[in-house]
Amino acid sequence: MGKTDSSYDPNKVGNGVALRVSKSSFIQYNKCPRQYWWSKIALPDLQIPASDEAIRGTAIHQVMEDALRDISDDTKLTLSVSADSPVWRGTAWDNLFDSHAIAQDVELDDGVDSLKEILASIIEDWGELEILELEDKHEIPYTVEWTYEGGKGQTDCILVGMIDGVFRMPNGEIVVVELKTGNANNGKLSRTRKELCFYRKLLMLKGYDAPTQFLTIFPDADDPNFLTQLMNKKNTTVYMGESKGLAVLEPVKTRSINAMENTLSNSVLGIMSDEWPIKWNEYFCTQWCEFHLSCNEEMLGV
């Protein structure tokens, strides 16, 4: 089964073509099956202009990737920098990030400042930062099993994901990393855990030892209540920027893994069953879905 022998459209699956399942696609189906249908089946070639928020987020992701790759003279991963290295201290570290921020046209963005402060704090706490992957794309064949009232079934899939980062701590634990720009709250962190569990699955299918920690970086976080809640959680380490932003390091929990597996299984079952119900939310649909007018007309019977 080749990488190209896959499709998001269930009507094209079969005869050597697998269902393509990305992190965003199965979460999108779980959030709203009808949105999945519009974007992946009805109008798959529709090019929707990126929002300013999305453009900024992509730029800051690129700054992190490029800056971390530059911490070593080696042009290939694994990269490593120790807390004793002058690379990340003071002017050298600032210049490294600033040069890439200028290249991405975000040199005046305070999210870049908090990002580099958070990463410096992590390096100092760990004593060393070993980077196994940065923005690597994975496409891995996998059979998803699902259950329904009549019994059980399975679907051959290609699981797809591009992981922001994979770090290894000095004690050998593998950490899956996700950078999230924009607002930060418990709901967003909970949704991110599901994404990280999917990435953890990809890494294990690729042959990695099971990642045991998740690191979620919120360079724009500025809610003191959210920070306080995180700092009061057991087995959780919080790294902060000087004026805003935080990162949360937490152990992988069985509950999160099971939740992701259930969502993945149910989403694949729904897609293969051609089930496209509308999950209407007055705020999220009207603010974040390009197809909400069509759904609204359908619900009104227009």
Image: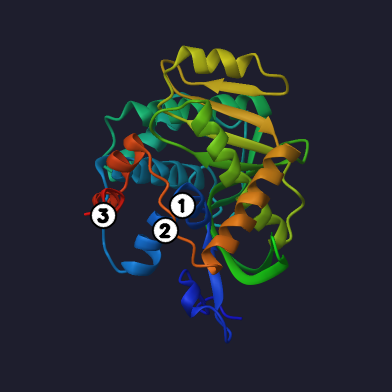
Q: Amino acid at mark 1?
A: Gln
Q: Does residue 169 sit above or below 8 in this rendering?
A: above
Q: Is residue 2 above or below residue 239?
A: below
- Please rate how many residues cluster around mark 2, counting C-alpha atoms within 10 Å: few if below 14, some from 14 to 19, many from 20: many
Residue 89 appears in the rendering: no
Q: Is residue 273 visible?
A: yes
The answer to which of marks 1 and 2 sits earlier in the sequence is: 1
Q: Residue at x 38, y 68 (%)?
A: 41
Residue assigned mark 3:
294
Q: Secondary structure at mark 1?
A: helix
Residue 272: percent from the left, percent from the top?
A: 55, 68
- Say which amino acid is labelled 3: Ser
How far is the residue under mark 1 from the one under mark 2?
Answer: 6 Å
Q: Going 55% across and 71% down the picture, which residue do you hit?
A: 19
Q: Residue at x 30, y 69 (%)?
A: 45
- Tell me what residue is drawn at x 54 percent, y 38 percent: 191
Residue 32 percent location from the top left of the image = 44, 50
The residue carrying mark 2 is 36
Instruction: Give the percent coordinates (x, y) of residue 270.
Output: 55, 61
Q: Which residue is mark 1?
A: 28
Residue 299 versus residue 172 in the image, above or below: below
